[in-house]
Amino acid sequence: MQIDPDLSADSGPDALAALLEWYAAMGVDVALDSAPIDRFAESEARKTAPPPQRLAPRPTAPAGPAATVQNVAAQLPNADAVMAARAAAGSAASLDELKGLLEHFEGCNLRLTAKNLVFGDGVVKAPLMLIGEAPGRDEDIEGRPFVGRSGQLLDRMLAAIDMGRDRNAYIANVVYWRPPGNRDPSDLEIAICRPFILRQIELVDPEIIVFLGAQPAKALLGSEVMKTGIRKARGHWTEIDTGRKRYRALPTYHPAYLLRAPIEKRLAWRDFLDVRAILKPK
């Protein structure tokens, strides 16, 4: 990405820092100068330059507590991390306790690049729980799920069926930290977070769960259930088994998709009408 030449030191350090932070959030890892560089001249200079001197190898630092902490902080997620997540999630007796466990859980490396843990938002013991895939930029900044444009659309859709996160709905994501550059979370990252969202479902204990998009439905229902894709799966009621209880569930389109394809709102509206008919909020 080319740096804006109009943004100079005169803009102040705050503006430069904000720009660099925005580039990092968008996944930019290379900066280009605004002035052209003659790569052919550089190549010729390298041909005539004397060979570099060979440096002595750097001594390896002995393993110690600092090295151990560093390795833990950037460990590669594996099956042991998944098992640790299951054990931790199963021990939570309340949503606050589950959130506290996630704040200190080191098994998912997404926490190293995210600004905030995005746990959930809404009413405990709500009759309706909605689950998305992962936080985006706005959610990462505020630490709340669905607060950007797609979240605003979701709030309007809920209001249209006399529901809302401030009264009778609860909203969460399968993954609790924003993946860098808004990339899709990996299967292993989803597997590590899965025990936590299953326990979160049990603690909220809703009457109905709505999956917002194909990814959360696939993560919690299994790839076999979702092998036909969200177009054919949406609008068809199914069940999710958390291991302790079965919950009625309905896949539908993600609000972000509806913003890109407004014509599909009519189908999502049918799904939300089905939810209202079952719950019949007063």
Image (tube, grey):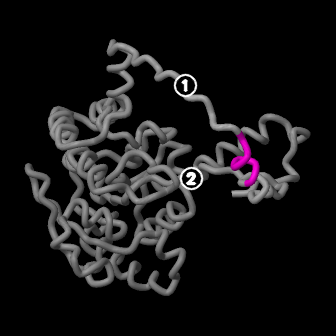
145 w.r.t. 228: above or below: above
Please indicate whether residue 244 sits to the left or right of residue 153 in the image: left
Disc 1 packing (10 Å; few <14; some 14–19; many ≥20): few
Disc 2 packing (10 Å; few <14; some 14–19; many ≥20): few
What residue is disc 1 on?
A: 55
The one of 7 and 94 positioned closer to us in this rendering: 7
Dot 2 or dot 1, earlier in sequence: 2
Where residue 183 sits, quadrant-wise, is bottom left
201 w.r.t. 12: above or below: below
Where residue 219 sits, quadrant-wise, is bottom left
Q: Are marks 2 and 1 in contact (CB under 8 Å)?
A: no
Q: Which residues are magenta?
A: 44-49
Q: Is residue 74 visible?
A: yes
Q: Quadrant of the N terminus?
A: bottom right
What residue is disc 2 on?
A: 27
Q: What residue type is disc 1 on?
A: Leu
Q: What residue type is disc 2 on?
A: Gly
Where residue 15 sits, quadrant-wise, is top right
Q: Is residue 75 magenta?
A: no
Q: CA distance from mark 2 to mark 1?
A: 34 Å
Which residue is depicted at the point 18% across and 35% down? 84
Q: Is residue 96 visible?
A: no
Element type where label 2 sits in the image: loop
The one of 82 and 122 positioned closer to us in this rendering: 82
Element type where label 1 sits in the image: loop
Q: Is residue 48 magenta?
A: yes
